[in-house]
């Protein structure tokens, strides 16, 4: 660290405070962003090889070591800066709604970025999003003496969406071309990938209804449409979330993830010949792809293959014969990183009884060396027993998994109140075979206060296959609530549960579920705390809302059935609703309209606003939030 900072000082560069964020280029060099430049450092010579400075107001900085170049945003415009060259503007953006090089489609479909370097760094692709036609939605800025509105672009379900294109900039020629994705413009350009030879750009193009995806190939030099490789259709939705992964040793071949057989699995394609083979199959789910070994013989992935949805293991599959081998051994949740050679794995895992173990695995020798074993951070604290269980869903046949935390001084002859912590929506699994069953600290704290803390993953949550997940289509909150009630019935059957003192709490989709449960089962839930709730899905954004509910005009019954504002007259228990006033995700209007309907129906509801917070209350104010939630249950449950 001292040697690194001495080199930085000689170049008048800001010193590093840690090496946590370094990225290795090879065994001898790494690069790091020190907040004023991208710096490439050689550990053998203990010298800086070169650095690329960027403006103080630059954002979304992307470095490519092969090109010795960075792409970044300055203001609304996209720039490139190459070693020993002056920065060049690639394209103009605008305050009015031309967005460059950033995640589009509100970061759905696995989109987390908007810059895509080609394999050799000779070209760079980027998203261009035109939001000028999208409705402005006002957020109130109270930081001024006279509050001001600040508009965001927020496309609500059924309304006009933005239009996206993909541009490619050639570093050698300076040419910029856009992929000619054509009409209609209201569609989703997802999972952008470069072919191995850089001749083509692959885009998973999804229609607005999100039930028909086409894998389209475009010429990266001209932008012309080349061909459609394949398509995927569904009666519910298609949700591509991972770009094509090309094989370095076979640049015409790539791996694609798909739910086409009902479970997320891996398929090997040839860009010229089409599908070669399905690599994985079965009633289990590939949850993450780690990458390929250096010779492109094996693909590494994490999955639920052994131990079911509660566990995650690392596997490798042979691209030649399809043979799958499990690499990790202990049951639990494994988070892994594979070396470039594919011969070594860093494995971090935990399970219900194990806080964390980090080990180095030798894939060939099938041996391991333990690097670290975390001590129990709660040793000496009063901790309740955690009980994992299986409960039948409302359909009477599907297994659901639950976690119950008992008070530290639990006495089966006594009666205890219960706080149900719920999310229940897509893309979130709360119960796992990981340390403490993946419970949050607040739930452990509530158990210490004498409550039973209960959580269950209902149908509609992830990594159980399409039949399990897609039963919620066009009726968000219906199946989920019925399943959650199966969990409550299980609780009510326990002799030590006070069935007259059951509360429920959740945030976002969990906030929606909290109110939903209190309206559907008003005699069951005595107290509820709902945070950042969706109360009417037609007020939610297009990408997420229309995927699960379709357009409002196509599913009028479904939107009415799931509208919490229309059922406020059913409320009986004590309900606290909390919202961030500048929430750009679930806009404040949701809870305000809900409160208005409560007033009309003469329902007394408690309400609290965090004036300067968005969808989540973060930082020091988080303590205030959780104390408020805790106090509400203490006072009324």
Image (spheres, helix red, strand yellow):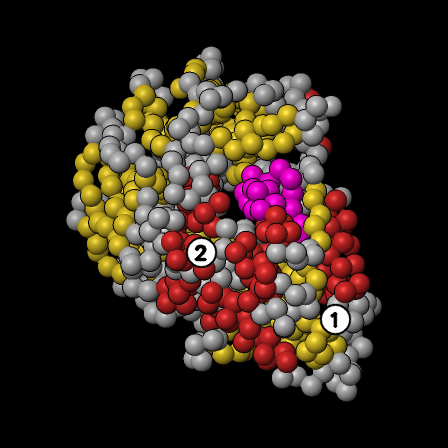
**Position of 225 relative to 629 (above/below):** above
Image quadrant in which you'd find residue 324 = bottom left
Q: Residue furthest right?
A: 380
Q: Mark 2 points at which residue?
A: 560
Left or right of 525 in this view: 243: left
How many other residues sit within 10 Å of disc 2, few (<14), some (14-19) or many (≥20)? Answer: some
Left or right of 557 in this view: 485: right
Tell me the distance, in whole angstroms, between the alpha carbons under discs 2 and 1.
Answer: 35 Å
Q: Does the magenta stretch include residue 193?
A: no
Image quadrant in which you'd find residue 634 = bottom right
Q: What is the magenta range? A: 577-593
How many other residues sit within 10 Å of disc 1, few (<14), some (14-19) or many (≥20)? Answer: many
Which label is found at residue 474?
A: none
Labels 2 and 1 touching (C-beta < 8 A): no
**Position of 628 relative to 144 (above/below):** below
Q: What element carries label 2?
A: helix
Q: Is mark 1 on a helix, strand or loop?
A: loop
First in sequence: mark 2 or mark 1? 1
Q: Could you tell me residue 524's position as x and y percent? A: 63, 73
Quadrant including the C terminus: bottom right
In front of the other: 530 or 269: 530
Residue under the point 49% across and 21% down: 95
């Amino acid at each position: 660290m001292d040697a690194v900072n001495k080199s930085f000082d000689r170049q008048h560069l800001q010193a590093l405070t840690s090496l946590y964020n370094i990225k290795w280029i090879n065994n001898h060099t790494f690069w790091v962003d020190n907040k004023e430049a991208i710096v490439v450092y050689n550990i053998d010579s203990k010298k800086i090889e070169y650095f690329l400075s960027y403006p103080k107001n630059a954002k979304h900085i992307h470095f490519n070591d092969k090109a010795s170049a960075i792409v970044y945003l300055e203001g609304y415009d996209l720039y490139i800066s190459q070693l020993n060259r002056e920065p060049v503007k690639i394209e103009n953006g605008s305050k009015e709604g031309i967005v460059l090089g950033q995640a589009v489609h509100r970061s759905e479909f696995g989109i987390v970025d908007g810059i895509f370097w080609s394999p050799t760094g000779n070209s760079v692709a980027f998203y261009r999003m035109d939001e000028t036609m999208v409705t402005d939605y006002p957020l109130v800025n109270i930081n001024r003496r006279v509050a001001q509105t600040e508009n965001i672009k927020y496309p609500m379900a059924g309304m006009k969406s933005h239009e996206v294109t993909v541009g490619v900039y050639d570093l050698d020629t300076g040419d910029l071309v856009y992929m000619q994705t054509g009409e209609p413009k209201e569609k989703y350009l997802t999972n952008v990938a470069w072919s191995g030879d850089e001749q083509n750009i692959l885009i998973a193009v999804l229609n607005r209804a999100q039930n028909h995806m086409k894998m389209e190939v475009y010429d990266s030099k001209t932008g012309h449409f080349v061909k459609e490789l394949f398509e995927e259709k569904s009666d519910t939705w298609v949700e591509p979330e991972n770009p094509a992964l090309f094989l370095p040793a076979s640049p015409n071949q790539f791996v694609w993830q798909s739910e086409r057989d009902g479970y997320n699995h891996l398929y090997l394609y040839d860009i010229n010949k089409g599908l070669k083979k399905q690599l994985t199959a079965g009633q289990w789910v590939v949850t993450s792809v780690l990458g390929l070994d250096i010779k492109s013989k094996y693909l590494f992935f994490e999955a639920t293959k052994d131990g079911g949805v509660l566990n995650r293991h690392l596997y490798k599959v042979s691209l030649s014969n399809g043979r799958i081998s499990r690499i990790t051994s202990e049951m639990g949740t494994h988070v892994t990183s594979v070396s470039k050679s594919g011969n070594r794995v860093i494995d971090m895992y935990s399970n219900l009884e194990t806080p964390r173990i980090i080990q180095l695995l030798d894939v060939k020798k099938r041996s391991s060396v333990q690097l670290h074993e975390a001590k129990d951070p709660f040793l000496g604290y009063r901790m309740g027993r955690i009980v994992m269980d299986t409960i039948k869903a409302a359909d009477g046949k599907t297994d659901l998994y639950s976690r119950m935390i008992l008070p530290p001084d639990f006495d089966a002859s006594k009666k205890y109140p219960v706080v149900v912590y719920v999310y229940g929506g897509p893309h979130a699994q709360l119960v796992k075979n990981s340390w403490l069953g993946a419970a949050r600290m607040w739930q452990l704290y509530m158990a210490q206060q004498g409550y039973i803390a209960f959580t269950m993953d209902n149908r509609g949550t992830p990594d159980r296959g399409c039949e399990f997940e897609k039963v919620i289509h066009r009726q968000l909150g219906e199946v989920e609530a019925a399943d959650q009630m199966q969990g409550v019935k299980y609780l009510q059957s326990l002799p030590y549960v006070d069935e007259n003192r059951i509360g429920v709490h959740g945030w976002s989709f969990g906030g929606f579920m909290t109110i939903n449960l209190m309206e559907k089962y008003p005699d069951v839930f005595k107290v509820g705390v709902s945070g950042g709730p969706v109360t009417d899905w037609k007020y939610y954004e297009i990408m997420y809302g229309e995927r699960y509910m379709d357009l409002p005009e196509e599913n009028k019954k479904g939107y009415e059935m799931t509208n919490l504002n229309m059922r406020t007259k059913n409320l009986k228990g004590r309900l606290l609703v909390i919202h961030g006033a500048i929430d750009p995700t679930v806009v404040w209007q949701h809870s305000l309209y809900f409160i208005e309907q409560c007033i009309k129906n003469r329902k007394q509801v408690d309400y609290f606003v965090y004036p300067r917070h968005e969808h989540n209350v973060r930082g020091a104010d988080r303590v205030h939030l959780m104390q408020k939630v805790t106090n509400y249950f203490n006072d009324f449950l």
